[in-house]
């Protein structure tokens, strides 16, 4: 088998699995910061206990994130060494900066958050919660900087086949960093908040631990409602940027083959690359042109405008993008209903809605994953857009059988870890906050 | 000297400090993992005490490795690319070890009925990387087959030559020492006595491994005999080990920890003195060596990263000390 393809599979597998955990960390640290702030201000012990409960879940999530995260930093060297040689000048810097400015902050203070409640003052504990929140979100920023540079490279020049940094600020805050960061963080908060909301809903359905579950459901659902509405804004902002900086990716998102004045926004379709056609197309007339250029007759470039060997895999890019959008719309609907129920003070009595929240826990993860797939598959055949092709980026000395072997091992280990993660999570939730907060240890 | 050279040399030192910082700090929790079966045996209370002694701080410790790796990537991408792809299977073994280590600390607490399994996973996940780090370092110092494109041209077996294996065992011994003196510092009673006596015996192993490494260096790299800074560091190692032995006997656990750390630092000093200015030495002749001069990033990257490191690392060290002080004192099996 082809070593490049195998390395791509391995990266997709390890990055995809890792990305289950950072969104949960983002959401949990945000909610913990809230509960701890309330405790600091009001001295209400309930909120102190809520922090304690959430911190126990965070400990498990964080351990999983750490275990699977370091694999990714190594993988640029192990599997993508040509890439590392060519762009190390620029791509390595955010990874190093992430360690120094963010990951240390998060990892050192999480020790205080998990073990230090009785050893520091209330204010110092609150500050630790803040540091963990800042550390994790800053860590995300550096990673997004690195990824965005792959999408919209800037602030460099090619010298003897290597990218050399010419402007740090332009490379870091390139054309897609801010858009991508906002969209990613909001997506992460959605996954994290619905996770907490779903767990709280389960307690309410079971009519237990209500004193904990009710405030937790309210705050987490409010975060979910707020984020799922503003995600339309960040998504739109990001999509406009993609259309302008990576037009071929936008054409693939939309399954748009011919360059069109007054292009429709695709709602459904089955694009077939061999026929250069999108079947069963349903679109809203002129909306794509309006959304990108605020002009119903603006021209949007189609795939046929670009050489075929520079097309990303159309079907995958189109489908993952549409799954993300469909889920995003579902979240908005759920949020609108939730808002109505909160307003009418019927949230805690509406069993079907609580069940819906509970069973929706995996959905924001699916939209996060498909969103990333659309972004990364849509960039193909490039590793660095218009600079370096993925096919030319892999390690040259690693034989295919070794990568196949490690894919098999990663798969086995990650399946095992995932089963255990779910098992322990369910165990903790079943025990409930009252039992959990009185247990020794973390 | 040109600016870029000053930057390249600075980064050689900085990356050395980051790796040495990782060795000393994560060294003690790796060491605890490797010593777990011997210090705790089947006594869960002792095992929990040991886990709790590292629980609040190990997360921060391992970031030294993540940062060192990132800094190596940023400052010397060729060295990072060559070593990580060339030592593919060894690196993957390290990763699998680190994965199991990270989760088994958590799972040990969460799954009392399977503590044997997670204790064993923690042990293996600690031992394998502890040995392989030294083996990898021994290889880049001794030299590996590189082609004109800086690509590794050996096999997995190339890595298992006598010199790297000896360095691997020396590093492992130093890590075990870190673990045992830290265990003594954080525990009481029987566990503390056992940790001290383990440390006391380990001093002899340490000296033997250190002598073996010196002899192996003379045999395999006679050209390095005249490097003065290496001899100074070697003297520091020996003196530290002697002071370590004295302090273990006196039950001065904190001082023992300091001297054990100092011995480990000076080992890195020797490695750095011998290795400079190479990043990855080539067996095929100096023309193939990856050095700090032909393997580095550009001037702008090196200088911006230096700024970030010089501002950031003192801050990191300051709050790390603050957090270590919060968790000062003995660990117990309870919390």
Image (cartoon, coloured by chain):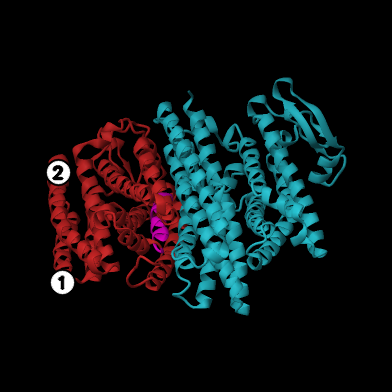
Chain colours: A cyan, B red
Residue at image location 34% in from the left, 33% down from the top:
B152
Q: Is residue B66 magenta?
A: yes
The residue singled out by tag 1 in the image is B250
Nearest the camera: A220 or A378?
A220
Q: Which chain letter matches label 1?
A: B
Residue at image location 72% in from the left, 44% down from the top:
A327
Label 1, label 2: how many angstroms apart (C-alpha)? 33 Å
The residue singled out by tag 2 in the image is B216
Name of the residue lying farthest toward the front? A207
> Residue A112 location in percent, x, y?
46, 68
> Residue A308 location in percent, x, y?
67, 25
Q: Is residue A114 magenta?
A: no
> Residue A366 location in percent, x, y?
65, 43
> Residue A91 location in percent, x, y?
50, 46
**What secondary structure prevails in the magenta region?**
helix
Q: Answer whether residue A172 is visible to the viewer in this image.
A: no
Picture quadrant where residue A185 is located = bottom right
Local crowd size for mark 1, using a 10 Å CA cut-off: few (<14), some (14–19), many (≥20): few
Q: Are marks 1 and 2 in contact (CB under 8 Å)?
A: no
Residue at image location 71% in from the left, 51% down from the top:
A355
Residue A200 located left or right of residue A415 = right
Can you say whether A431 is above or below B216 in the image?
below
Q: Earlier in the sequence, mark 1 or mark 2?
A: 2
- Which numbered mark, 1 or 2, is in the foreground of this view? 1
Residues in magenta, as a range: B56-71
Q: Callout 2: helix, strand or loop?
A: helix
Name of the residue lying farthest toward the top? A275
């Amino acid at each position: 088998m082809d070593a490049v393809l195998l390395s791509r599979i391995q990266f997709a597998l390890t990055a995809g699995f890792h990305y289950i955990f950072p969104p949960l960390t983002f959401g949990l640290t945000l909610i913990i910061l809230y509960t701890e702030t309330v405790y600091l201000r009001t001295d209400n012990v309930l909120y102190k206990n809520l922090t304690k409960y959430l911190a126990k879940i965070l400990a498990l999530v964080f351990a999983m994130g750490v275990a699977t995260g370091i694999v990714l930093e190594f993988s640029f060297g192990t599997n993508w060494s040509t890439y590392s040689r060519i762009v190390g000048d620029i791509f390595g810097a955010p990874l190093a900066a992430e360690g120094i400015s963010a990951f240390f902050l998060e990892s050192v203070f999480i020790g205080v958050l998990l073990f230090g409640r009785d050893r520091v003052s209330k204010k110092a504990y609150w500050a630790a919660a803040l540091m963990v929140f800042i550390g994790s979100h800053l860590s995300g920023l550096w990673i997004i900087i690195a990824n965005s540079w792959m999408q919209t490279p800037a602030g460099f020049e090619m010298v003897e086949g290597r990218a050399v940094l010419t402007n740090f600020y332009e490379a870091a805050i390139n054309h897609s960093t801010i858009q991508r960061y906002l969209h990613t963080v909001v997506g992460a908060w959605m996954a994290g908040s619905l996770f907490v909301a779903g767990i709280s809903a389960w307690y309410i359905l079971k009519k237990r631990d209500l004193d904990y579950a009710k405030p937790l459901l309210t705050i987490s659902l409010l975060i979910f409602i707020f984020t799922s509405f503003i995600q339309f804004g960040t998504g739109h902002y990001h999509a406009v940027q993609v259309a302008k900086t990576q037009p071929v990716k936008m054409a693939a998102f939309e399954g748009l083959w011919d360059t069109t004045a007054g292009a429709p926004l695709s709602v459904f379709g089955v694009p077939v690359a061999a026929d250069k056609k999108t079947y069963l197309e349903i679109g809203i007339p002129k909306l794509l042109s309006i959304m990108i250029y605020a002009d119903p007759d603006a021209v949007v470039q189609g795939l046929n405008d670009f050489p075929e060997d520079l097309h990303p895999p159309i079907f995958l890019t189109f489908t993952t993008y549409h799954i993300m959008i469909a889920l995003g719309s579902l979240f908005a609907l759920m949020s609108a209903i939730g808002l109505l129920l909160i307003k009418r003070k019927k949230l805690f009595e509406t069993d079907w809605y609580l069940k819906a929240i509970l069973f929706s826990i995996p959905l924001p993860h699916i939209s996060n994953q498909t969103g990333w797939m659309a972004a990364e598959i849509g960039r193909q055949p490039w590793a660095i857009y218009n600079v370096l092709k993925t096919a030319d980026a892999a390690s040259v000395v690693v034989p295919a059988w070794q990568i196949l072997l490690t894919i098999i091992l990663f798969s086995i280990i990650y399946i095992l870890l995932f089963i255990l993660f779910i098992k322990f999570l369910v165990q903790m939730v079943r025990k409930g906050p009252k039992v959990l907060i009185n247990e020794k240890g973390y | 000297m040109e600016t870029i050279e000053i930057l390249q040399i600075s980064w050689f030192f900085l990356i050395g400090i980051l790796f040495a910082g990782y060795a000393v700090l994560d060294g003690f929790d790796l060491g605890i993992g490797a010593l777990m079966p011997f210090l705790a045996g089947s006594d869960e209370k002792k095992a929990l005490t040991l886990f709790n002694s590292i629980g609040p701080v190990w997360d921060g410790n391992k970031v030294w490795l993540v940062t060192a790796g990132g800094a190596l990537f940023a400052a010397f991408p060729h060295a990072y690319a060559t070593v990580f792809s060339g030592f593919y299977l060894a690196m993957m073994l390290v990763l699998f070890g680190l994965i199991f280590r990270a989760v088994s600390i958590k799972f040990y607490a969460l799954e009392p009925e399977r503590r044997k399994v997670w204790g064993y996973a923690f042990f293996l996940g600690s031992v394998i990387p502890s040995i392989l780090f030294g083996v990898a370092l021994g290889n880049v110092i001794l030299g590996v087959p590189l082609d004109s494109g800086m690509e590794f041209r050996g096999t997995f077996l190339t890595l298992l030559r006598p010199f790297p294996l000896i360095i691997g065992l020396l590093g492992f011994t130093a890590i075990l020492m870190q673990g045992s003196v830290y265990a003594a510092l954080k525990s009481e009673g029987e566990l503390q006595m056992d940790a001290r006596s383990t440390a006391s015996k380990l001093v002899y192993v340490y000296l033997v491994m250190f002598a073996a490494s010196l002899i192996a260096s003379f045999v395999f790299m006679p050209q390095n005999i005249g490097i003065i800074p290496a001899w100074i560091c070697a003297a520091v190692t020996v003196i530290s080990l002697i002071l370590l032995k004295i302090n273990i006997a006196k039950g001065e656990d904190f001082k023992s920890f300091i001297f054990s750390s100092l011995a480990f630092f000076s080992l890195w000093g020797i490695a750095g003195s011998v290795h400079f200015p190479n990043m990855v030495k080539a067996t095929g002749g100096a023309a193939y060596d990856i050095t700090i001069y032909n393997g580095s990033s550009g001037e702008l990257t090196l200088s911006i990263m230096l700024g970030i490191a010089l501002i950031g690392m003192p801050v990191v060290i300051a709050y790390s000390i603050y957090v270590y002080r919060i968790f000062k004192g003995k660990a117990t099996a309870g919390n």
